[in-house]
Image (cartoon, rainbow, N blue to C red):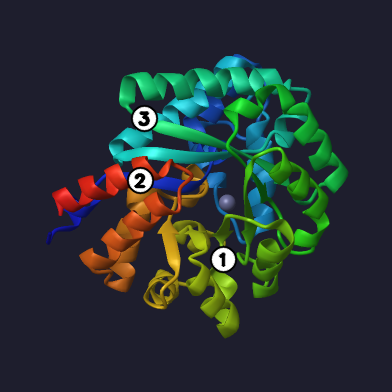
């Protein structure tokens, strides 16, 4: 396989995607009009212009303002469905989608409203696009563990619709050990567990997420490079890292894409994967991330294929399903 284009056409999985981060300026504008919500912007272009961030916190401030336009079940459906249409374009055949219930329930939106919209879109994606999707309910780590525990309780009627729990939002100052009880409880209830760690936070947060939260995957994890013993441990245990290159660039986790360490981690034997994080805010969906890596790091086709295969093996799909897709990819390359 020689051309970039043919790599981009391979079947793919996405493992690190916040559905609230797929809210495009046009949809933010339309929903604000629909619900008569006043935005601090006077046009779609003005919203687009506002998507300039200097760090994780300034991004999060705008992000939470954006989620305010999501009010009824149809809004959540439209948001999710628009992402599935993007999945189709990038040939994403399976996706594990994070959502932040607290950013909605705290505004008075019922848990049932969120799930009604999401479940409708997920079923439609399966039926009409052949795309499978799992949900990862993520807790906002700048809030208390008690709040996360309440959310876990509130989600009870929907446990069958949710595959995993996660931990996101402001990392610095909100270490994994703040959430040991809720992760233990979720694990006992049968959920898979993931957590953001080692994005802005130090490598020790990655160690703690594994040791204290017993996670199945680390989201981001690029700061692992600062700790040689940790890199060895991650390689030995096949711990997946869901890396998000364009996000890292936009939030200044790296100064330039040529400095990104994803291929270094790959060559050290880590199960790294490529993902888009909050694509409408960070300048690109999944294939844009692959293209950026090829352009900046001279990523080879063989490396891209390993990254794509890693996302299948690191997913929560049943083993037989993973094997089916890996064989399919082998037949295409
Ligand atoms: Zn993320």
The alpha-carbon separation of the residues under discs 1 and 2 comes to 23 Å
Report, in whole angstroms, how far the alpha carbon at label 3 lies from the one at label 1.
28 Å
Residue drawn 74% across the image and 49% down it? 183
Secondary structure, mark 3, is: helix
The residue identified by callout 2 is 322
Given residues 196 and 215, the one toward you in this image is: 215
Q: Where, by quadrant of the figure, is residue 198 drawn? A: bottom right
- Sequence-first tag of 3 and 1: 3
Q: Which residue is mark 1?
A: 221
Name which residue lies at 19% across and 57% down. 4
Inter-mark Cα distance, 2 to 3: 22 Å
Residue position for label 3: 85
Instruction: Tell me: residue 23, above or below residue 11.
Output: above
Q: Does 119 sit above or below residue 238?
A: above
Q: Earlier in the sequence, mark 1 or mark 2?
A: 1
Whether the residues at callouts 2 and 3 have beta carbons within 8 Å, the answer is: no
């Amino acid at each position: 396989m020689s051309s970039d284009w043919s790599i981009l056409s391979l079947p793919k999985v996405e493992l690190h995607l916040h559905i609230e981060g797929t809210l495009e300026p046009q949809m933010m504008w339309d929903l604000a009009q629909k619900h008569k919500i006043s935005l601090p912007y006077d046009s779609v272009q003005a919203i687009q212009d506002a998507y300039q961030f200097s760090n994780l916190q300034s991004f999060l401030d705008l992000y939470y303002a954006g989620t305010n336009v999501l009010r009824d079940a149809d809004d959540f459906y439209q948001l999710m469905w628009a992402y599935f249409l993007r999945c189709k374009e990038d040939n994403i055949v399976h996706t594990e989608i994070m959502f932040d219930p607290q950013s909605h329930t705290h505004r008075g939106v019922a848990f049932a409203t969120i799930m009604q919209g999401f479940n409708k879109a997920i079923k439609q994606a399966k039926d009409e696009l052949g795309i499978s999707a799992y949900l990862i309910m993520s807790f906002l780590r700048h809030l208390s563990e008690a709040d996360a525990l309440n959310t876990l309780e509130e989600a009870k009627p929907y446990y069958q619709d949710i595959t995993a729990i996660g931990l996101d939002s402001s990392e610095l100052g909100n270490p994994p050990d703040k959430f040991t009880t809720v992760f233990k409880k979720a694990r006992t209830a049968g959920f898979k567990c993931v957590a953001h760690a080692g994005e802005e936070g130090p490598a020790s947060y990655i160690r703690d997420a594994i040791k204290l939260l017993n996670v199945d995957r680390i989201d981001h994890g690029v700061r692992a490079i600062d700790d040689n013993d940790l890199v060895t441990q991650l390689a030995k245990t096949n711990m997946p890292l869901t890396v998000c290159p364009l996000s890292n660039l936009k939030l200044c986790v790296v100064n330039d894409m040529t400095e990104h360490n994803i291929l270094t981690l790959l060559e050290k034997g880590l199960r790294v994967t490529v993902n888009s994080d909050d694509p409408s805010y960070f300048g690109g969906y999944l294939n844009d991330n692959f293209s950026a890596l090829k352009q900046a790091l001279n990523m080879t086709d063989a490396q891209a294929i390993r990254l794509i295969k890693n996302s299948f093996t690191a997913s929560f799909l049943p083993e037989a399903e993973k094997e089916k897709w890996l064989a399919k990819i082998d037949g295409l390359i």
